[in-house]
Image (cartoon, helix red, strand yellow):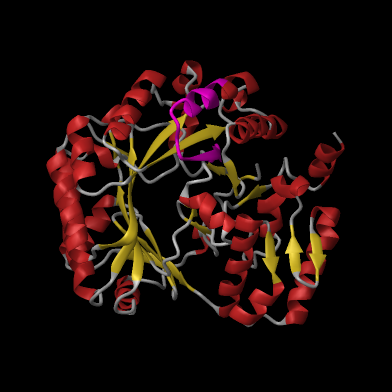
Amino acid sequence: MEQESQLTRLGLFDARVPRYTSYPTAPHFAGDVGPMEFAHWIEAIPEGASISLYLHVPFCRRLCWFCACRTQGTQSEEPVRAYAETLLAELRLFKERLAPGVTLSRLHWGGGTPTLMPGDMMRRLADAVFDAVPMGEGAEFSVEIDPNEIDAERIDALVESGMNRASIGVQDFDPQIQGVIGRDQSYEITKAAVDMIRERDVASLNADILYGLPHQTPTKIADSVQKLLSLGPDRVALYGYAHVPWMARRQTMIPSDHLPTPQERLKLFEVARELFVADGYDEIGIDHFALPTDGLSIAQRAGKLRRNFQGYTDDQAEALVGLGASSISRFPQGYAQNAPATSAHTAAIRADRFSTSRGHRFTADDKMRARLIEALMCDFEVSAAELVQDFGADPEELSALFATCAEHFGDMVQVSAEGLRIPVKARPLTRMIARHFDAYDLSKAGHSSAI
């Protein structure tokens, strides 16, 4: 009770803060990064380097009301095929600018619903990717799979193309909750998809589940988590539902008067967390769980856990290239985002140019703060010596930053000559503590609840 009182005093239940999957965050991107910069940054990738590649497929058979991703509904195959042709053309542009010998460490197809594509198109797309940049040793090829939009033919196409990690969205198994978030997906349908994946010896399975949904109770989330655990995922993301109807208009369909209070959200998270830990999963950062044999757990133990637009990752590549409408790339030089609208993106590719519409060039201060925030989000501690040695941070300025953080958060942070640490009791505050080191205007829209 005393801890909850302290969390309340520090504003945990009132704050809206970024998820910090990037720094600076996407609302701070500007229009001074365009197709020319994107092309130059690709050309600057060194010969023989290892990179990550993300392909965005923005189509869904139906639009889930909780989702804030850039997606659009379609009932026919035609727009999906047309978009896939655009991706093939974009891959050709990408290949033309890529140095020899570059390989993939990670390939991820997300959306939307990539599994809306028919099997023949999946094979063509995978072939084009590997023609542009082949998989490196130990590389992972993951695909977001909608259990409602998958069958044996499409699973076979993905596996034969090299998919070795599948990702399924669960959200919640309770029928009432599914009804109010527009996501009908029974346990039986989900299990059938998982069985098809496991029968084909796909090495790893990810799953997403949400807390903070309308009508969710500790009993209901416990039931959903236990059903998910019965499917044996290797890695789980336990995301807090972000209710941002001013950004995602479809969320106006969700009854906000039935959303849990911030205090109830924290309880829902704790119930789910305790079940995952009791079942042998390692806690990864603030909202992921993984079996000890999973790459995330191994990376965490080695101090190599990273943060990117998909959340936590063990990927060590310096560049993540995003292709497709609205995709975001991260280069050593900065961020670049493609045109969000499918029509604008397609028009640019047909004109033989990339569709980059905005981004951000890193300053030295950006790089230092990005690493500081990433370290807090991944390891709950940051090394002052690392920031000084690797990013040229001024020791006195860094000490002053840590001191002002300690003044605000008290014993919820521990400052020493080595750096700053977040103790276990303060981990619900991690994003708020990270926000303390954000040098940008925090009034930008789109930030979610702190828990």
Residue at 30% across, 34% down: 197
Q: Residue at x 62, y 56 (%)?
A: 377
Q: Position of residue 337 (x, y in %)?
A: 38, 62
One can see residue 441 in this view:
no
* Residue found 33% across the figure and 79% down from its top: 46
Q: Residue at x 58, y 36 (%)?
A: 280
Image spot of residue 78 (x, y percent): 14, 39
- Against 345, is 261 above or below? above
* 439 lies left or right of 188: right
* 3 inside magenta stretch: no
Start-end of magenta stretch: 223-244
**In magenta segment, residue 235:** yes
Report the quarter where the N terminus lies: top right
In this view, 270 is above or below 159: above
Give above or below for 71 relative to 344: above
**Which quadrant of the structure image shows residue 323?**
bottom left
